[in-house]
Image (cartoon, rainbow, N blue to C red):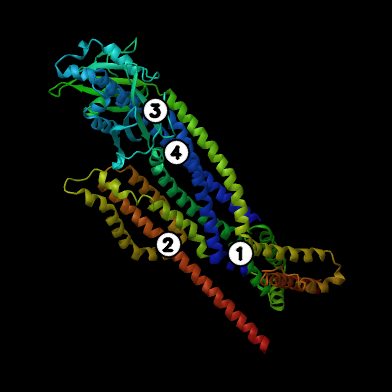
Amino acid sequence: MSVRRELDSGFFRVRLIVLVVGGVTAAVLALGVSALLAFDRAVAPELENRTRLIGAIVRGEIQQAVELGIPVDAIAGLDRHLGETLGRFGEVERIAVRSMAGELLAEAARGGAAGESRFTPAPADVLAVARGSFVLPVLAGNELVGDIVIEVNSRFVQTRLRDIFLDVLVVALVASVIAVELVFALAHGTVGRPFDRVLRLLREQREGIFAHVVGGGGLGGLGRAAARFSDHALDLARRLATLPAATRAGLVARAGIRVDADGPRLLRLSDVADIRLALFLFSVGTEVATAFLPLYARDAGRPPWLSSELAAALPLLVYLLAIAIMSPFAGALARRFGPRRLFVGVLAPAAVTLLGMGLSTSVVGITAWRAGLALCYALGTIACQEYALRAAAGAVQAVLLAFLHAAGRRRSGCR
Amino acid sequence: MALFWRVWAVVVVVNVLVLAFFVGLATLRYASIDAALVGERLAVLANRTATPFAAAARIGLSLQAVRNAPAVLERARQTDEAIVAIHVFDAEGRVVHSTAAAAPARLPPSAAVALAAAAGRPWYRETEDGFLSGIQIQSASGAPMGGVLIVYPRRASLTNLRAMGAELAVAAVAVLVVSSALGAVLLRLGLAPHLAVFRAVDQSIAAFERRSWRQAFVTVAERGELAEASAPAAGQEAPGDDGLAALLADAERRYLDARRSLAAADEERS
């Protein structure tokens, strides 16, 4: 049927992924740009304070030398002094001292760009010539002898925000993937699964089987159809229940219908999509710490004989080992207890192991809890695989039955 | 349409969570940048202020003996009117010079801890009392002789932080409103072909129900016609229906047949 085809189609998935991921990423970028502008505005007064301080320090040194009678163009070690000052302030790109004639007397700049004349503003009376650059005059007594130019890195705030952008983009990406999975689960739960149930009910009733009802009818018309055709099964069962057994058997045989004596049962359909969101969230929840686990383990307390490199690798090593050990038995356990029960059963232990791992301060503790998590992970994922295999087998079986049924009808029609 | 609105609601909720996370993280980051900017500036000022005291210490004088200390400290304080106090303390942590009228007798414990951790380098720390920044002064032999401590208020930083949080929150709400509206349009356009298929199912069921209720009160004499009436009207299947209308009609007809058989059995029994 076309609804199932639509939900399973690549076009639907791709469009949904593009729209959801694009929407979330665009929102984050838009807020990022406005945060940058806000940061720029907010730090401007402090940057100005810092620039004033730099200017005051350099100017004080120069004025002291000039007042002692040393000409401004003959001060020894001025470049080194400017370089030291530059090193203390990360946001300053360049400090230069110029004579009144505009001649460059000393300069310190980041990235080996010293000597280049980047701008040629006229000495200003007070402060600030252009966005990102400042000029302070140098006085000797009542005489203007030169100026100090301070150029501030205009990308200072952006540089400091780069880390946060990376963090937020990762979060946005994860949130987008979760959103995509939620939307798929939503479409499956409100349209796909109810549609499959109603379709199965209709096909059964068309063949005279009034043995099932469906619950959770879905949106709009699907919900109404589910209620209506479930009621048909209930109605027939109720009416037949009032008849004597012999009459009932004869009637059922004559009408060519099948109604269970105990009343209709709830129709349960398994689908691979049922476990999709659960498995995704379980995997994200258990694996989210994997990226920083080596760093965490390396810095944790460890026995003296254990090197930091091995300490970093140990939790991952033991994790893989535990998964390899548990995998052969997990399938049998899923068959023994049922995939659903096994999956639900490992959720609480998995949460406890994550908590234990977070509270551990030693490599041994982290590794032990991580091994426990690996066992839970193996059991949970293999339970989901078992469920998916059963659902897929059921679907194949249904297709085969439908095919055989259709072939039988066609053959009888030919006759 | 119900599916569309639900999909849209999921996207909006995810956007709200991501933007709220962004606002929180960005506000904290701003607090850290602001503190670092102020702290670095105060550390440089402390270093500069300590220069004459360090010169005295290098020739073996105690810090208390520097005569123009009040003027040196006042000149440093005037570089920023917001500075609460600048103290000079000796090796035992006693405050020997200060710009504050009511200077504390000793170095605050948080400053003493930060000073010890800084190992002679300029340092700054954000405490409950405000920003503290300072530098140690050493003798010619490298022995600690005391140091300079600058106390700076946190009030302005806290106000800035709150203002930044509010500004980012307002921006986030604006981005959310615009992205939600734009998202609704894009989702509607992008998913239109798929939503049309889901709508076709609804239309098939609605058409079936309509035909059914139009015949709900037919007389007993007309009951025989019901089987035909429950069949789908030719040409009324919704596009993309894929035989759902026929399936609905078949299932309904089968139910009515069964009901007719039951009614006949009832008549026979009576």
Query: Pointer 4 and pointer 3: residues touching (CB < 8 Å)?
Result: no
Residue at the spot x=23%, y=22% of the render?
A: A70
Chain to which the residue tagged by mark 2 belongs: A
Q: Look at mark 1 in the image and give the residue it sits on.
A: A265
Q: Look at mark 4 in the image and give the residue it sits on.
A: B26
Query: Pointer 3 and pointer 1: residues touching (CB < 8 Å)?
Result: no
Chain to which the residue tagged by mark 4 belongs: B
Residue at the spot x=25%, y=53% of the render?
A: A314
Badge nearest the viewer, 4 or 3: 3
Residues packed near mark 4 inside 10 Å, few (<14), some (14 to 19) or many (20 plus): many
Cα gap from disc 1 to disc 4, whole angstroms: 55 Å
Q: Is residue A267 left or right of residue A71?
A: right
Q: Look at mark 2 in the image and give the residue it sits on.
A: A383
Residue at the spot x=25%, y=48% of the render?
A: A364
Q: Nearer the viewer, residue A146 or A96?
A: A146
**Residue type of the residue flagged with mark 2:** Ala
**Where residue B118 is drawn, which disc sits there?**
none
Q: Look at mark 3 in the image and give the residue it sits on.
A: A123
Give the farthest residue toward the left: B141
Cα gap from disc 4 to disc 2, whole angstroms: 41 Å
Residues packed near mark 2 inside 10 Å, few (<14), some (14 to 19) or many (20 plus): many
